[in-house]
Image (cartoon, grey):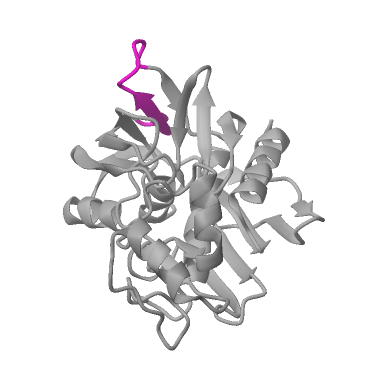
Amino acid sequence: MHGNQHTLKKAYYFEGKGLHTGTYAHMKLMAAPEGHGVKFRRTDLRTKPVIEALAENVTNTARSTTISHNEALVVTIEHIMSALTGLGVDNALIELDNIEVPILDGSAKPYIDAITRDGLVDQGVARKYLDIPQTLEIRDDRTGSWVRIEPADHPSADITVDFNSKILGIQSAHWDEFSDYAHEIGVCRTFVFFHEIEYLYRNNLIKGGDVDNAIVIVEHPVSDDQLSVIARLFNMPDLQITDEGYLNNLQLHFPDECGRHKLLDLLGDMRLGGGYLNAKITAYKPGHGINTKAAKALRALLK
């Protein structure tokens, strides 16, 4: 991806429910001039405020990444940020008429499909890569998670996820500028453990979750009554548990799709560092909280 800055050839429109708020939103993804970066505009608010997709604007990381400016919020930005990063889009303006980005199919695939049909516009100005002077490491002793950012001559990322799950096991994934992001990472969907669903729903999260946008992992034995409750929640009467330990609402794209999705999230969150990073990122048990802390530490180091 070394070379010039790129933007979109045309505007793209998306609509749907937000994963956590359940609110319905219309979203317009548009080209932007060189040096613009990625910004969101809330068109439903009186002043139509613009929020820069930068780490210092992150205000919530409960199961997704939220950025805000004053009272204006944009929730669950990580998938669109990941798609723009993986496809090599430097500059874009994203208009949204509600609080949360639509979850669509739970991956970055809808954005990938739209953008790759047309290709990108070369803006004739060199891309500004972020070079760091020293290794940066952020750790969370409570969870055992860490993110390490080391100087390098090109961007790359390696993640390992371990949920202490007999279904998932330990999964790893890799990305660099030569990877096929569109087919190997961007298509991988979000996931949730069965035993977490009722708790998340009662705590005003995953209000927009349904059978089309989430892989559900069944780690512990489930009664028929529990399955019926989730079937009603998802409005899917014929829910069953597969031999591999997942609900049968979706077929996996890859055996390690969940691990690849965590890499998708990491790429989106780390883009909040302000651009493309000439660094090797290594992460163990990444999540939005530690990802965005790493992006904030990166911003502070670069200043």
Residue 142 in the image, given as x and y percentages of width and height? 80, 55
Q: Quadrant of residue 113?
A: bottom left
Q: Is residue 37 magenta?
A: yes
From the viewer's perspective, is residue 108 above or below residue 72? below
From the viewer's perspective, is residue 115 above or below residue 159? above
Q: Nearer the viewer, residue 200 or 255?
A: 200
Identified at 45% across, 43% down, the residue is: 76
Magenta span: 34-48
Quadrant for the C terminus, please.
top right
Residue 158 appearing in the image: yes
Q: Please name the predominant secondary structure of the magenta segment in the image.
A: loop
Identified at 49% across, 76% down, the residue is: 223
Residue 276 in the image, given as x and y percentages of width and height? 51, 47
Residue 188 appearing in the image: no
From the viewer's perspective, is residue 14 above or below residue 178? above
Q: Residue furthest front?
A: 225
Residue 159 in the image, given as x and y percentages of width and height? 60, 66
Q: Quadrant of residue 254?
A: bottom left
Q: Nearer the viewer, residue 168 or 301?
A: 168
